[in-house]
Amino acid sequence: MLKEVARPRFRSAFLAATAAFLFCAALSRAQSGSPISSASPVYQDITDETGRTVRVPQPVTRIVSLAPSLTETVYALGLQDHLVGDTEFCDYPADARKKTKVGGGINPSLELIANLHPDIVLVTKAFNRLETVQSLENLGISSYATDPHTVEEIISSSKKLSNVLGAPEAGATVAGEMKRRLADLHRRIGALPPKRVLFVVWTQPLISVGKHTFIADALRLAGAASIVDSEQDWPQVSLEEVARLQPDLLVFAESHSDSASLAVEALATLPGWSIVEAVSKRRVAVISDAVNRPAPRIVSAIEDLAKQLHPDAFTEKPESNKEKIEKENPPPNHRPAAHSSFWPGNLQARMAIPGGCACAR
């Protein structure tokens, strides 16, 4: 009787143990297989230029820009295919106008931004509002802020942004090219006395730039010195002060030079402005509005202004017959060796020839 009772109990225990073993084996195989598609995304904690810690999904494949300067920087880094949206003011390059618009930089549509499912939204401290950043955070959308105040900081900011967006090589290339062009400009005009200028942001009322802005720094790099010495970023300037200081030139930043010419003509007709010599004699420099945007293209505006303020520094001196003969028939001690890496335009060769120019081109 005992044997008959024990036998079914043993059989039940055996079957239960076998079932548990098979379940564990199946679970082990499932866990050791390929990851399932719903795996948690990877994030990287990054500190932006305002000191905030931001969690950024990796890799970044969908970008929304809320400032024209940041849109330009994204294009300069070659990441335009990842730009899924920008603002109504993002007009450069021309392709940026074709991107989905999310409104303005001050009051963008949070609904439109959310519908674009961005990995990151790019903002600037100067152009965008803190409320926008906080609203994005409440929606679970990461935002990264930039805040450059000098041209050097624009360069470093572009490089930092390239790291955030996963394109460090492109950032290094863009930064290196900006530095090279500015160094070449400094070699040409660095020793020249600066021109005293009034940078005109707005004519009525007259508004200029303060000394701590990146625009004032751009003026300095172009061989200019603003007559406005203000701690405010966008100070209002009186006509009496301008007349007292008498700038050498007025500088306008416009998309079209015609609009600047109209502005000068309008100033000339206003009471009192005729005593400002730069206005009465129409001494005006007009440059691209790229100078208003803290992006890589600002270097082009700096170069343009420098050429207008110091044209002689960009005029190549004609060679004399003696210099031509010496260049074509250099002395034996100046002839390159057979293994030399000499080629036309080589910097070392130019420095060895009397009258040659040592400036990089």
Image: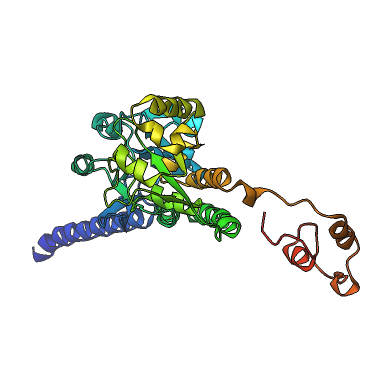
Residue 182: image quadrant is bottom right
Apparent side of residue 159 relative to residue 326 in the rendered image (left or right): left
The colour scheme of the drawn protein is rainbow
Q: Residue furthest left?
A: 1
Apparent side of residue 170 relative to residue 30 in the rendered image (left or right): right
Apparent side of residue 204 relative to residue 94 in the rendered image (left or right): left
Q: Nearer the viewer, residue 239 or 212?
A: 239
The percent coordinates of residue 340 (x first, y second) are 82, 69
Above or below 1: residue 257: above
Q: Nearer the viewer, residue 62 or 256?
A: 256
Residue 153: image quadrant is bottom left
Residue at the (44%, 29%) spot, across then down: 264
Q: How many marks?
A: 0
Above or below 73: residue 117: above
Residue at the (35%, 50%) spot, across then down: 213
Q: Residue furthest front?
A: 275
The percent coordinates of residue 272 (x first, y second) are 34, 31
Q: Nearer the viewer, residue 242 or 288?
A: 242
The percent coordinates of residue 12 (x first, y second) are 17, 57
